[in-house]
Amino acid sequence: MTPIILDMDPGIDDAVALSIALTNPAIDIKLLTSVAGNVSVDKTTINLLKLTTFFKQTQVPVARGAASPLQKEFVDASYIHGVSGMPGYEFPTVTTQALTIDAVSAMAKVLSEAPEPMTIVATGSYTNIALLIQKHPDLLNKIKQFVLMGGSLSGGNVSSVAEFNIFTDPDAAKIVFKSGVPIVMIGLDVTLKALLSLHTIDAVASLGEAGKMLHQLMTAYGDSEPGGKPMHDVNTICYLLKPEFYTIKDYWVDIITEGPAAGATIADTQNRWSDGKINAKVAVDIDTETFEKWFIEQIPVMNQYLESTV
C-alpha cells in the first residue's frame, strides 16, 4: 500500500478522487486535510467528513486547513461546484469531527512519525503545503514527493494562462515549486483530455450505491468540455496507481504571482533560463480511453468495499 496525505477542497471532482482513494486497497490515507478553494474551508472540511462517513472510513483523520490564501483575497468556485461544494446527493448525517489541531500541525505529526518518506497529494490550492514548508523545513526530507493537480502549459481555465488551484494561491504555489521536494504536476494539459463522456456518467448511475452517489454529484458538476466532463482531481489518484497512462516531461516550472498573468505556470521548455535544472515532472498527455475504462472499473471496487463494511 502507498501511504499518502491527501490535501483537498471538495468540490465535486475532489469527491470523486477521494471516493477512489478511500476504497482502493493500494492506497493508505494517513490524513485528510481541507483547504479553502472550490468552497470555504468550513464546507470543504464537512465534505471530507461526509465522504469518510459514506464509505465508513471514519477512522481516517480529517484536519481543517487554511481559510484563505497566503496573500490574495479568497474567491471560491461555487459557480461550478454549487453552494455546498457537493450538491446532488443526500449524504448520511456526519457524526464525526475534524481533529482539534490544524492541518499543518497534523501533517507535521504524521510526517514526523512516518517510518519512510510519504507522498502528499494536493487537489486544491497549496496553502497548507506552503505553510508546512515554512513552519517545518526540517520535515522536507520526510516528503517523498508532491503529486499536484494544478497548472497548465497550454492555457488556463480562470484566465488565459492560469489554472484555478494555482490562481487561488499563486504565492503558495511558488513556495512549493521552490521547495526542492520532487513534484509531479498534473494540470489542464491532461485533465482537459481525461474526460468522462456523458454516456459513461449516465452508466455509472446503475452501478450500486457508490455509482448512484457519484452520478448525482457528477451531473451537478458545472464544468464541462465538448465530449464530456473533466474530473481533474481524479488524475492525481490515477497517476499514483497507473503512472503508465501518462506522458511525463521534466521541466523547471516557475509561478507568476502578480499582474494579469498571476497564477500562470511557466516551464522552461527551451532551456533558456533554468540552466538545465528540473523541479517538476509535468504530465503533458494521457491515454484517454484507458483512463475512462479504468475509472469505470473503480465503481465496483467502491461497492465491494461498502458491502464488506456493512
Image (cartoon, rainbow, N blue to C red):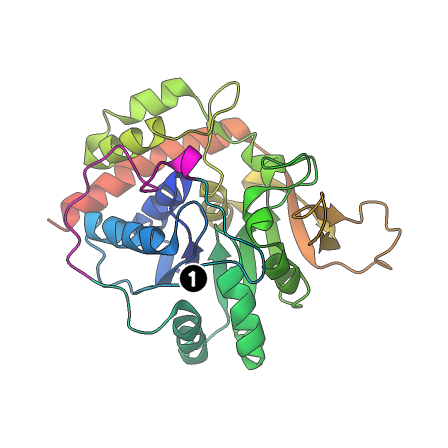
Outermost residue on the front side: it is: 73
Give residue 151's position: percent from left, percent from top: 62, 45
- Judge whether 309 appears above or below 98 on screen: above
Q: Nearer the viewer, residue 94 or 252?
A: 94
Residue in the picture at 31% in, 33% down: 217
Query: Which residue is painted at 67% across and 68% down in the image?
Result: 180
Answer with the quarter of the image where residue 111 lies: bottom left
Query: Where 100 falls versus 175 (above or below)?
Result: below
Return the residue nearer the eye: 149 or 246.
Answer: 149
| Picture layout, residue 31 above or below residue 52 | below
Residue of label 1: 4
Q: Is residue 253 above or below residue 199?
A: below
The answer to which of 104 and 214 lies nearer the viewer is: 104
Q: Position of residue 77 (x, y in %)?
A: 45, 40
Secondary structure type for disc 1: strand
Q: Nearer the viewer, residue 246 or 42?
A: 42
Residue at 29% across / 65% down in the picture?
61
Q: Is residue 278 left or right of residue 128?
A: right
**What quarter of the picture does the N terminus occupy?**
bottom left
Report the number of discs.
1
Is 88 part of what is drawn in magenta? yes
Query: Quadrant of the rendered structure where residue 302 is?
Result: top left
Q: Residue at x 68, y 65 (%)?
A: 178
Q: Main secondary structure of the magenta part?
A: loop
Where residue 235 sits in the image (x, y, percent)? 49, 42
* Residue 114 lies in the magenta-colored region: no
Q: Label 1 sits on what residue type?
A: Ile
Any part of residue 143 in sight = no
Percent x, y of residue 279: 70, 59
Please state the extent of the stretch shown in magenta in the rendering.
78-96
